[in-house]
Image (tube, rainbow, N blue to C red):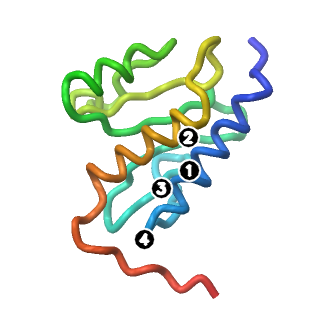
Amino acid sequence: MAVPKSAPKMREKAREFALGLPGVVEELPWGGAGAKAGKKVFVHLGTDDGSHPLGLTSKRTGGTAHAYALASPGAEPAAYGLGGSGWVRIPLEESGAPAAGLLCDRAGESYRVLAPKKPVAEPDRR
């Protein structure tokens, strides 16, 4: 199956959005890109090297938000038992995948759930 041209662009927009949130740094946990606030990864973007399908994994709380995320084409509870804690993986290569704006919204919601309640010190960006 060919990767839709929009999938890498959507992934990159979600990545840029997540990294623009206060106190966020990029980390490469679990073999792919992720955004971390404090000590917690709040969104995982997987790899973009073609070894796995492109996707975005984020934390969803509340029954309605979780069900809504799972309604996306191909969405599923995250692997390694994370799905039981509200993590949902949304594939970006499926027909009807959410638009970049919605992916940014989901990353933002996950950030609000997992980011430290006290402001995180901004890293020195020099």
Where does the C terminus fall, quadrant-wise?
bottom right
Q: CA distance from mark 4 to mark 3?
A: 10 Å
Tell whether label 3 touches label 1 (CB within 8 Å): yes
Image coordinates of residue 120 in percent, x first then y, are: 34, 74
Pointer 2 residue: 46
In 3D space, how far apart are the residues under numbered discs 1 and 2 (Cα atoms)?
5 Å
Mark 4–mark 1 Cα distance, whole angstroms, equals 16 Å
Q: Secondary structure at mark 3?
A: strand
Secondary structure at badge 1 equals strand
Residue nearest the observer in this picture, 49 or 98: 98
* Front of the two marks 2 and 4: 4
Mark toward the viewer: 4 or 3: 4
Q: Give the spatial CA distance, label 2 vs label 3.
A: 11 Å
Counting other residues with Cα less than 10 Å from the Cα at mark 3, is it few (<14), some (14-19), or many (20 or more)?
many
Image quarter of the N terminus? top right
> Percent position (x, y) of residue 3?
75, 21
Query: Which residue, given by chain and number where applicable, does mark 3 sit on?
Result: 35
Amino acid at dot 4: Gly
- Which residue in the protein does label 4 denote? 23
Say above or below: 5 vs 41: above
Identify the disc placed on residue 33.
1
Picture quadrant of residue 100: top right
